[in-house]
Image (cartoon, rainbow, N blue to C red):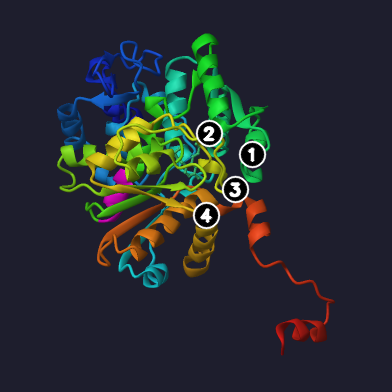
Amino acid sequence: MFQSQRMAQRSWGQDELHIQCIECGAKYPPDEVIYNCKKCGNILEVQYDLKEVSEKLKASDWKERPLSVWRYGELLPILDESKIVTLNEGGTSLYKCERLGAELGMKNLYVKNEGENPTGSFKDRGMTVGVTKALELKAKTVICASTGNTASSLAAYAAKAGLKCIVLIPAGKIALGKLAQSMMYGAKVIAVKGSFDDALSTVMEASAQLKVYLLNSINPFRLEGQKTAAFEICDQLGLNVPDKMILPVGNAGNISAYWKGFKEFRSLGIVSNLPNMIGIQAAGSPPIARAVKKKLKRIEPVKNPETVATAIRIGNPISWKKALNAIYESRGTAEIVSDEEIINAQKLLARKEGIFVEPASASSIAGLKKLAEAGQLDKNDVVVCVATGHGLKDPDIVVEVCEKPIEIEANLDSLNKVLGI
Ligand code: AN7
């Protein structure tokens, strides 16, 4: 009884939130299944009546709730909270990294460890909201294209919700752990002969023609879940914002979601500043970072993207416009890192801080190192790097780049010999 009363308070009326085009401002009701603006074709976002949100927050117990995606229910677009599909996502650690900070000359370095989420990546924040939305909209089947983590997460949440799940992955190009997750959660796994970008255009067509609900980050509800990581960081810093937020960028939804989160917290007066948003891309697929370096307002898609960081091997990011807005509006920047820099950063983070991340996540550390060495950061800056996915997602790369185990006979002499004692 108590639970349902509290939930009911957090639910939205139809007219208090809507979907809005980021370019022309056209508005659509929250129960319309729509991914692009019907007037100008641009991508969409969820908008709230923030005055209404402010009143709801004041009347609520949100500050007493545990750190999690649903702590911020008043800022999430769910109409029927009885349908929430959750595996306890969010509430991830914000580690203060003293040893890594000393190595890089930064005094206030933090890592937000999103690998702690139920399927091992930040995608779970989006899927708890996105799959709940799928139930609200009475979808029976959900679909996505993925470099791996989106698929793993959607497969898990669809299983929990009792929905059919179809995932399209680039054939032979996703990390083993991620493939294993999608297969085990029971998704229909379809390997597309082509890149992630090819797989995404295929699912976009499918969702326009078939009765399947699309849960790539073009779905504005999914990004609402992902913005809660920004709220958590503010909470974990004692209602302060970092000076710099550094994130890996692939399809560019996450950096956009963080920026929206920080801006909403500031509009509500919960925090008083905003961070500079810094996006990091791999040298083999840097469409957004390249545009930022040239101060362009559009991206030039990259054909045949290639990088060891398979999660962000994306040449034509769907949310590029939102990401460029986030970077320019926040007076942030972008950086390009090589595969070698990514692997070195992956080892550095593991060996200085005990945090094991997949290569895409390590790109944020590689980017930080590069910017720090170039003198683009102040040593006192409060910097938060997002570690987007767990290291066990991609065991193959570890076996390739780390020192191999040493095999010995089972006796002390053999051990002493290899230890040089
Ligand atoms: C670990 O799973 O796009 O810029 O299909 O898995 O929001 O795309 C993964 C992206 C960073 C980039 N780090 O985030 C997918 C997919 C990890 C990721 C990103 C991804 P976006």
User: Which quadrant of the view contains residue 367?
Assistant: bottom left
Q: Residue at x 51, y 56 (%)?
A: 342
Q: Does residue 31 sit above or below 148 in this rendering?
A: above
Q: Which of the labelled discs sits on residue 405, or is there none?
A: none
How many marks do you count on the picture?
4
Side of 77 where 176 appears, left or right: right
Label 4 CB-ligand 1 distance < 8 A: yes
Could you say which is closer to the camera, residue 370 or residue 345? Answer: 370
Could you say which is closer to the camera, residue 54 or residue 253? Answer: 253
Tell me if I can see residue 280 in this picture: yes
Label 3 CB-ligand 1 distance < 8 A: yes
> What residue is pinned by disc 3?
393
Q: Residue at x 49, y 21 (%)?
A: 214
Lower position in the chain sequence, tag 3 or tag 1: 1
Q: CA distance from mark 4 to mark 1?
A: 18 Å
Q: CA distance from mark 3 to mark 1?
A: 13 Å
Q: CA distance from mark 1 to mark 2?
A: 15 Å
Stretch in magenta? 230-237
> What residue is pinned by disc 4?
357
Secondary structure of the residue carrying numbered label 3:
helix
Q: Does residue 263 sit above or below 95 in this rendering?
A: above
Indicate the amino acid at tag 1: Lys
Indicate the amino acid at tag 4: Val
Q: CA distance from mark 3 to mark 4?
A: 8 Å
| Residue 100 highlighted magenta (yes or no) | no
> What residue is pinned by disc 1?
173
Indicate the amino acid at tag 3: Lys
Lower position in the chain sequence, tag 4 or tag 2: 2
Secondary structure of the residue carrying numbered label 4:
loop
* Quadrant containing the C terminus in the rendered view: bottom right
